[in-house]
Image (cartoon, grey):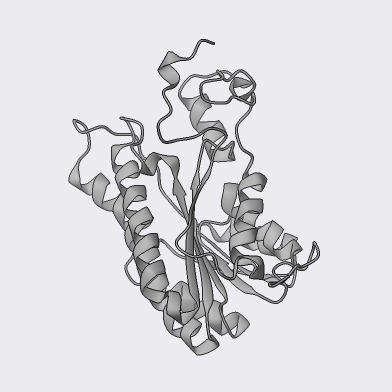
Amino acid sequence: MNGPLTPAGTRLKDKVILVTGSTTGIGEAMVRLFAREGAQVMIHGRRKDAAQKLAADIGGTAAFVIGALEDPKVPARLVAETVGRFGRIDGLVNNAATVARGNIEDTNQEAFDLIVAINLRAPLFLIQAALPHFRKQGGGRILNIGSINSYCGERILLSYSVSKGGLTTLTRNLADAHAAEHIQINQLNVGWTLTPNEYALKLKEGLPGDWHTKLPKSVAPSGRIHSPEEVALAAIYFLSDEAALVNGSILDVEQFPVIGRNPTKEVE
């Protein structure tokens, strides 16, 4: 059999991975599980106290960097600080994103530009900054965290959906452009996930504290939605040597087929 089979706990051994937006939710689950699989992780967030606490919790294989991704100077700095701290960078996970409600009537230019800056522009320039290091090392892995909203999206998530659609094109374009350099670029299109931010948002919107246990089968056939840890487990594969020849792949992390499904005809 060709290709590596790595035992649990070593799938990311000695790999240096930068994960943006990793002080909470899916990003936090990623850095915790990546470290458990042997990686050295660079945590990124906006709040120093949260990043510092998480890095201390993980231990000596973790460090952190603070920065607002809408600042054009920050993407290159995050990569530079990762290389400065660990001496190299093997993987980049573009996880950070902002979600703002808005349809075509109530979306303004400032809000649209902010979402695109964080969700699409920053990943592009993070990749740009990482490419020279990947080339010097003979390759690298990039994983973009997209959304099933990239296919169409909810009507109140117009700008967010557009940004994630752009991210999908970015993933495929760069995967094709840099495959011969042993640089793999893949994407997870994540479905509804029970992050702390999502839980709090639904409470703010008026749902009861146990809303996540009473979901209709049209959105949660299994009776629940994803946990951040389940998304992180999918991410490990794409960053490991097990996916050495997987490139330009878009994996829907969802519990039903996204394309062609018509839940309006289902009977609860």
Res. 120 in view: yes
Coordinates of residue 168 in the picture (x, y in percent): 37, 54
Along the line of sight, the residue nearer the viewer: 36 or 24? 36
Q: Quadrant of the N terminus?
A: bottom right
- In the image, 103: left or right of 126? left
Coordinates of residue 66 in the picture (x, y in percent): 50, 65
- In the image, 112: left or right of 129? left
Residue farthest front in this picture = 1
Along the line of sight, the residue nearer the viewer: 46 or 135? 135
Along the line of sight, the residue nearer the viewer: 116 or 244? 244
What residue lies at 63% left-to-right and 28% top-to-bottom? 224
What residue lies at 31% left-to-right and 57% top-to-bottom? 117
What residue lies at 63% left-to-right and 21% top-to-bottom? 210
Q: In the rendered image of this protein, does residue 40 appear above or below residue 172?
A: below
Coordinates of residue 259 in the picture (x, y in percent): 41, 36
Q: In the rendered image of this protein, does residue 31 appear above or below residue 4?
A: above
Total labels drawn: 0
What residue lies at 35% left-to-right and 31% top-to-bottom? 154
Residue 120: name its quadrant. Answer: bottom left
- In the image, 164: left or right of 18? left
Residue farthest top in this picture = 267
Coordinates of residue 185 in the picture (x, y in percent): 47, 66
Q: Quadrant of the C terminus?
A: top right
